[in-house]
Image (spheres, grey):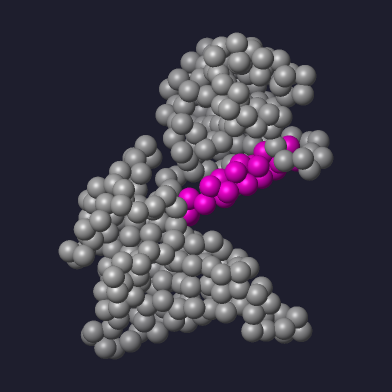
Amino acid sequence: MKEYFERIRKMDPQDNYVELKVISGSAAGDKALYVNGQRIYAERDFFPLTTASFDLSGTGILEMGDRLFYHERLCGKKKLVVCGAGHVGLAVARLGRFLEYAVTVIEDREEFAAKAKECGADHVMVCSSFARGLEEVRGDGDTSFVVVTRGHCDDLESMKVILRKDHAYAGLMGSRKKVEMLEKNLGEEGFSREALEQVHMPIGLKIGAQTPEEIAVSIMGEIIEVNRKRKRGYGYPEEILEALCRADRPAVLATVIRKAGSGPREPGAKMLVYGDGRFIGTVGGGMVEARTIRTAGEMLHRKDPDRAPARVISVALNAGTMEDGKGICGGRIDVLLEVVEA
């Protein structure tokens, strides 16, 4: 299994990775991995389909014959590119790191670039122009661009490069008058009205933000909102993926595969549980997490050499009352549990 997870860890963000898992019958837990519609890994020979045969663009349940499958398009590492290391740019970079984005800051002033390094940015590019720095950035469907430079010309040149790249989000800070001028200039450069409408300008959610830190919250909140609407799944969090590649002891990988009604996490959320009760990640906390940890422990400690390698548990969230504080969400969460051997 280490080889399987190593493939995922090394996946090219430009490619389309889809994971397919059996969630019913004796083969529950068996999986296959597809890249750009072609199968590159399968544990059994009952994965004949290509991703072009079905709509596997997000996450969901697929029925084929007498088997049920869970499919998920795997997201790459979330990336945040910040153009400008002024007060707002630095606040966005700090918050982006807290939210586990790989943060790149582009700046044309040495002293401000130094501050970006101090705030924890993963990569700082000191360039003669923002446009030149952006040319070196490889955009993809997991990259968010935030333009908070100090001048109209820098904003315009930055957006001209960004709009030609694949991206999950693009936003620019400025007054409405400035935005109108930029839209006019970009239109004259040949960018369509449809392309310009995808740019968030003025940037950020309307929460009355004033300080750099508040503005950063509004910007990152908008990025989260945009990405969640795309429903691309969670993929494998970096810490969980590293543990799976290391696989130094048995564990249970828990994945939310279906949610009905209200619930804490969407399909794709993952958690890795060890026999001593320790875990990495979350499938939602509360009743869902407690049941997941308990069941994972039972699976790992069972003495039967033919123990089931996988099972699905269903947790109802509507059984309690307001008084006991349990199960009042009114939904149901289905979680796939898979034993991962060392």
Number of residue marks: 0
Q: Residue at x 72, y 83 (%)?
A: 321
Q: Which residues are magenta?
A: 213-237
Quadrant the N terminus occupies: bottom left
As drawn, which residue projects farthest toward the left?
Answer: 45
Residue 241: where, in percent of width, then height? 38, 56
Hey, which quadrant is residue 306 in on the image? bottom left
Quadrant the C terminus occupies: bottom left
Residue 243: where, in percent of width, then height? 37, 60
Can residue 62 be seen from the camera position used here?
yes
Seen in the image, is 119 located left or right of residue 291? right
Q: Residue at x 73, y 37 (%)?
A: 215
As drawn, which residue projects farthest toward the bottom?
Answer: 303
Q: Is residue 305 above or below residue 197?
A: below
Magenta segment, principal secondary structure? helix
Q: Residue at x 45, y 53 (%)?
A: 58
Hey, which quadrant is residue 117 in on the image? top right
- Is 228 contained in the magenta span? yes
Residue 92 versus residue 131: which sits nearer the camera?
131
Seen in the image, is 166 located left or right of residue 114? left
Can residue 6 be seen from the camera position used here?
no
Residue 302: where, in percent of width, then height? 33, 87
Residue 252: where, in percent of width, then height? 38, 72
Seen in the image, is 162 located left or right of residue 221? left
Q: Is residue 232 above or below residue 275?
A: above
Seen in the image, is 264 located left or right of residue 270? right
